[in-house]
Amino acid sequence: MTKTDSTGSTWRYRWAHRQNERRQRTFRAADEAWRRRDDELRRLRTLAVSFHGSAQAGVGLPMELAPGEVVFWTLPAAQLVEVRHTAVLPAPELTVDPDPPVLRPRRPEGVKVVDAGLAVLTNRRLVLLGGRGRRDWAYGRMTGLSHDPGAPVTLIQVLDRRRTSGLLLPTGAAADFRFTLTLAFADAIEQRAAVVAELDELIAEHTAARPERPAVLTPAQARITALVPGGRRTVAVGAALALIVPAMLIESNPPTRAGSERAAAATPAASVTPAPPQHVAPAVKVRPTTSPEPSRARPAPPRGTPQPPVERRCGAPANPFGYDFCGGQRIRRPAAGVCDWFECVPGFWSDRGWLVQCRDGSVSRTGGQRDVCAGHKGFRRTVSR
């Protein structure tokens, strides 16, 4: 027996089933991405609170530690790089990036490799023990620090060295190194509590953005437009064409003026050679009755005719949040139920940019990022309000 709802319509039941399945898939993907980021934030906070080094970790290293100096981190596959054209780097900041960008194993233009060896991170300095000697970057003399957003390169400026230098690391070790360097620098200037406070703020903000489970749709909520391929968009396009096409036809074939009709009728008669007159009676002049020329203005619709509502969306689906494609304020923190009205990409809530629409029709939070709408045919336009 075919399963029907209270209205007896099987298509309504199928519509509700499809919509609920789509909403559940979107919610599960968003919830999984949210849980992964939550675990990463809490792991970083635990590491920041319990951050400490060990003097025993320096045993066997080809370098001498100063009194009270402890080792935090070591990596044997580091490369020493220098910049050909030195620029002023920004001052070191105590910021944490819980979503590190995807790095490519490449060397940026203008950066050359001059040595390679063992990188050692202590509570007082960063050291590279290379084949040509040792290179130190003391935290107390550090004036500039910059992490390349597309390559695993970290550049450092210090007071006692004119040329800017740094490290080129394997892509898999860059994120761990950058976070550990931030903690080591904060610990050296006695500001580790600021890093922990920033992580607490990120955790609170992430907790407030947890995706909500969507409400279950019932067959009674199905609209008749669901029977049309494309749904409400197809109906809206058809209604617009029904209004535009007759207007275009009227403009392309305007009514002919009365004077032009008389001129056209008189034209062929003027080309015929008239016969010589035979006792023609004097003509009686009759003044023709002039009639007003018909107006080309479109007739006004009769009173009481319903006019289509005008809503500023520029192609965006109807939604209670006022989101549209007309241009305006960017949306960095979309409403929790945005995926109930727009087609969200998998992992929607794990991104950190503003709201954009991709070329496949889905929406994403990758606005302003280098990989905007990656895997969804590229960027199309920005969602605004």
Image (spheres, rainbow, N blue to C red):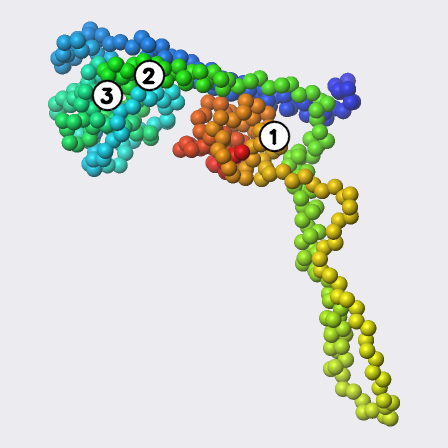
Residue on which the image places disc 3? 77
Label 3 or label 1, whichever lies nearer to me, is 1
Q: Position of residue 60 (x, y in %)?
A: 16, 10
Q: Please report the residue visible at 47 percent of the width from the left and 28 percent of the height from the top.
A: 332
Q: Quadrant of residue 130?
A: top left
Whole-angstrom CA distance, mark 1 to mark 2, is 39 Å
Callout 3 crowding tier (Cα within 10 Å): few <14, some 14–19, many ≥20: few
Mark 1 lies on residue: 319
Q: Give 110 or 323, whichever is nearer the viewer.
A: 323
Q: Position of residue 27 (x, y in %)?
A: 55, 20
| Quadrant hosting residue 199 | top left
Circle 1: element type: loop
Instruction: Read off the residue under disc 2.
Output: 195
Label whose residue precedes the other's in the sequence (3 or 1): 3
Question: As shown in the figure, which amino acid type bears the numbered disc 3?
Answer: Ala
Q: Secondary structure at mark 2?
A: helix
In this view, 260 is above or below 237: below
- The first of marks 3 and 2 along the sequence is 3
Marked residue nearer the N-terminal end (1 or 2): 2
Amino acid tagged 1: Asn
Q: Please provide percent x and percent y for residue 118.
A: 20, 19
Which quadrant would the C terminus be assigned to in this image? top right
Q: Residues within 10 Å of mark 1 (few under 14, many from 20)?
A: some
